[in-house]
Amino acid sequence: MNQTVAAPLVELRGVSRQFPTDGRARVHAVVNVSLQIGRGETLAVVGESGCGKSTLANLIIRLHEPDEGTVLLNGTDISHLGPKAMRPHRRTMQVVFQDPFASLDPRVRVGAAVAEPLKVHGTKRGEELDEQVAELFELVGLQRIMMKNFPHQFSGGQRQRICIARALALRPELVIADEAVSALDVSVQAQVMNLMLDLQNELGLSYLFISHDLAVVERIAHRVAVMYLGQIVEIGSREQVFSDPRHSYTAKLIDAVPIADPRQRTERPLLTGEIPSPVWPAGEGPEPVELIEVEPGHLVAKE
Amino acid sequence: MTDVGVALEAVEASGRGALRMFLRNKAAVIGLVMFTFIVLVTIIGPGLYGTDADKMVARPFSPPGDELAPRLGTDYLGRDVLAGIIGGGRTTLAVGAVAAAMSMSIGLLVGSLSGYYGRWLDAALMRLTELFQVLPALLFAMVLVTLLEPSARTVALAIGLVSWPAAARLTRAEFLRVRELEYVKAARAIGSSDRRIMLRTILPNAMPPLIVATALTVGIAILFEAGLAFLGLGDTSTISWGSMIGNNKGYILEAWWTVTFPGFAIFFTVLSVSLIGDGLQDAFNPKLRGR
């Protein structure tokens, strides 16, 4: 087996990204993040709003360029590729966004929206293209006659299926789901998650699943990374993180999940206080945390 | 459903929904009828009416209703005022349309590049826009026309050149708004080229306010043309509404009809265009839908 085949699908090495704010201060959105996503694996990234989860996703699909560190896709460094050079790599990874009402162009028929990636990459045209779009519709559990409709004629769940179909059009290896089920109500959420799991089995997809909902994450993830203020404070398998959280922030997040049965509820400390700001004056920045391997595959930040 | 969702939902209904809204707006329909009538008169009117606008047909300053004079009287040279109005509209409307098209084209180009690419390009283009915006428009247009020999073409060019900043700023604002929407991000993630994203994704969604602005720009351009012609700048060999007023302005007290009727022509044209513009604005406004 050679090196490139053995390489993980995606690998981040010490990736950081800052954004300028008014004045000279900077938002340290992602700080020194290293992680790997294996083939056919679901890595969930959890953390509260503003912790840098979405920036992380944008760095991987290169909607943002990292300031520091490298992003490797199938062993190739894509950190600083220009739009043209990036194009072939876009086929490998696609994204499903949070808001199913905003992520489809209201003026484009959904069939055309799903066909768009195929057109842009010039793989198919004419009837062949229509047929492939129809197959994608069926793959995500929609009927092919729906192709002619506009986005506003669909429910949130259906739209998210359309977005998934669009993401799958180029047969990617990685699908990034940026809060992809957060905007859906619970029953629809379950349907879309089942669809995502089925597709993973069928197509061998890897997912980067970004969410703030731990119940969802527990269902779908193989591995979990916990982000706090732009840094990963704990990463490990689902069992390791959920049954044996070692970082205080992870423990608090898990404790904060509501328990349906009142008799099983215990007294628990709520998350209190504001999280510190990720905004720093120029020249200053957060202290990078040091991750220690507490058991194989389970890394925790020193506190 | 999110607020964005609701808004998008409503905008989506555009197309036919906007047309229905427009047709339900009485003022807008009146504007449209008026404007169609004016355009028809300027196109086929001279042929039907038969009198040459340049021809001296009666005693100078014959008042309207004079038995020997044409219906709307004659000007200081004895030319038929009604013939002038019918024949002079052609220049005014053509210059207005060409100038508005030019203004919107420049504005669209500058605004879309500025709004889409941002950063230094935005800064540079916006400073350029401001430069054109702070120049006194009428004065600048007068200088341009004088330097480039007065003709309908240079007048249209000058009006286009002084009136694009508003269109550029509007386009930029729309591009800034639409650029951040998730479906544009999705297009980028797919690997669409910048050109494709700008033309196929952002532009169609930025169109409604730009269509409204185009209609209003036509009105402004017509007024501008009239203003320049009034000042004697323009093609002196053809009659336009503005030049009729300009040529007769010295006799306004003795022969009110020589300036009043061309004035009405300009007034009703600009009014009709503005009514259409307002109607379009309401038609594209999702908040007024479904009333």
Image: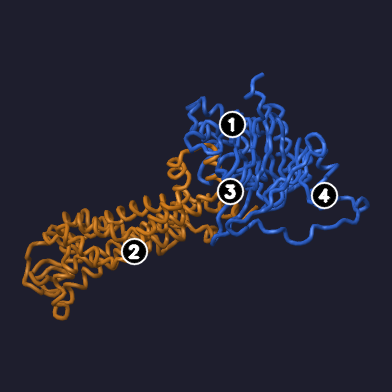
- N-terminal of the pair, mark 3 or mark 4, is 3
Name the quarter where the C terminus of chain B is drawn: bottom right
In the picture shown, does residue A2 fall above or below B253? Answer: above
Pointers 3 and 2 within a single chain: no
Pointers 3 and 1 within a single chain: yes
* Tag 2 residue: B133
Mark 4 vs mark 2: give the one in front: 4
Label 3 SS? loop
- N-terminal of the pair, mark 3 or mark 1, is 1
Q: Position of residue B212 (x, y in %)?
A: 40, 58
Density class for disc 4 (Cα within 10 Å; few <14, some 14-19, many ≥20) is some
Q: Colour of chain B?
A: orange
Q: Position of residue A13 (x, y in %)?
A: 64, 38
Q: Position of residue B6 (x, y in %)?
A: 59, 54
* Tag 1 residue: A92
The image quadrant that residue B147 belongs to is bottom left
